[in-house]
Amino acid sequence: MFRPAPIDHAEIMSAIIQLQENITQVIHSNNQCINHLLAAFFSGGHVLLEDVPGTGKTTLAKSLASSIAADFKRIQFTPDLLPGDILGVSIFDQHTQDFKFHKGPIFTHILLADEINRASPRTQSALLEAMAENQVSIDGNRRPMGDPFFVFATQNPIDFHGTYPLPEAQMDRFAMRLELGYVSAENELKILNDQQHKPPLDDLSACLNLEQIRYVRDAVQHISITDELKRYIIKLIAATRNHTSLQMGASPRASITLMKCAQALALIEGRSFVTPDIIQALALPVIAHRLALNSEAQFSGKNSGQIMQDIISQTEVPA
């Protein structure tokens, strides 16, 4: 009979707290956003951070990358960016009389896709296979990604000039869509003080290595979630598929993602099991970006976030 290896909860919590403290040295924002980011990261998902320019999206991504002793690459998405600029290209070597593949920046552990919606949908789609299957197919060969492989994408709101909406298939690859929002006056004063001499990001050093990250990710799978809570997740997802304002509800991938992120957030909060309030807290950032409104709902001024909030409030919560 298979018996999982015992988990050292003290070691796990120590690693998580170190990572949280490292990030908050640079990011003076609400801790909920940081915890949700870490929940996606530790559950093996990817994150889309959408907000107006200047709110710290790129800085948050760099803070996470700098806190982990791992390979980090950044791609600045622009309208002229091509899929080959992301995946890599095969170049003919005259000495060997053969083609040699030169890896693109996607072959890394942590990838920052900065302003992803400034590139064309064709270029955006270069990330699809890697995000879903941890591999890319190039020239008939399958090439595995790093372990871990985490995409942190940022984008400006889609009504800004020079942006392309991400296709539905691309949005479904992201475990969560998060927003930092504007900081309070007190936190903005801390930012000004931090930036007075030099950016605090310059002094940030790695506090965790890849082995520790994999250990925490393994621990996520040991977090208990009851069948009753799994049915609650299914009810939330099913409600999106039957909603009169939606032409496309959430996919089964959303159900799996919500369950895994809930396990990860429970671990981050020091719990050994998932509770209904964790699922409720994550349902909006995990599900809302996957929904497509029908034309009537769009004309009436509704958005997917409001609809998801209504679904959460109207769905019976397990006792």
Image (cartoon, rainbow, N blue to C red):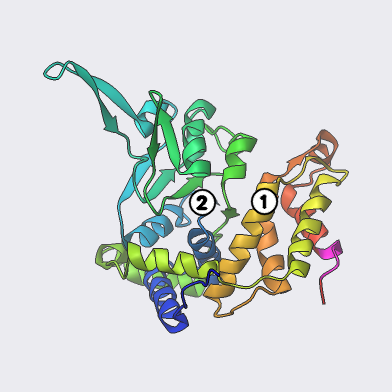
Q: In the image, what residue type sits under mark 1?
A: Ala
Which residue is at 68% across, 45% downward? 290
Residue 54, percent from left and from top:
45, 53
Task: Provide the residue designation for mark 2.
Answer: 46
Task: Provide the residue designation for mark 1.
Answer: 254
Nearest the viewer among 102 and 96 is 96
Q: CA distance from mark 2 to mark 1?
A: 13 Å
Q: In the image, what residue type sits under mark 2?
A: His
Residue 315 in the magenta stretch? The answer is: yes
Q: Secondary structure at mark 2?
A: loop
Kindly give the residue lying farthest to the front in the view shown.
Answer: 1
Quarter holding the N terminus? bottom right
Of labels 2 and 1, earlier in sequence is 2
Q: As displayed, is residue 32 above or below residue 80?
A: below
Q: As displayed, is residue 183 above or below residue 134?
A: below
Q: Is residue 297 left or right of residue 291?
A: right
Q: Determine the main secondary structure of the stretch shown in magenta.
A: loop
Residue 300, percent from left and from top:
84, 42
Residue 149 in the magenta stretch? The answer is: no
Q: Which residues are magenta?
A: 313-317
Kindly give the residue lying farthest to the left in the view shown.
Answer: 95
Q: As displayed, is residue 105 above or below residue 311?
A: above
Q: Is residue 164 left or right of residue 14?
A: right
Q: As displayed, is residue 168 above or below residue 20?
A: above
Name which quarter of the figure residue 310 lies in: bottom right
Residue 67 in view, yes or no? no
Quarter holding the C terminus? bottom right
Name which quarter of the figure residue 104 lies in: top left
Which residue is at 35% across, 72% downward? 193
Which residue is at 54% across, 34% downward? 163
Residue 6, percent from left and from top:
47, 78
Q: Secondary structure at mark 1?
A: helix
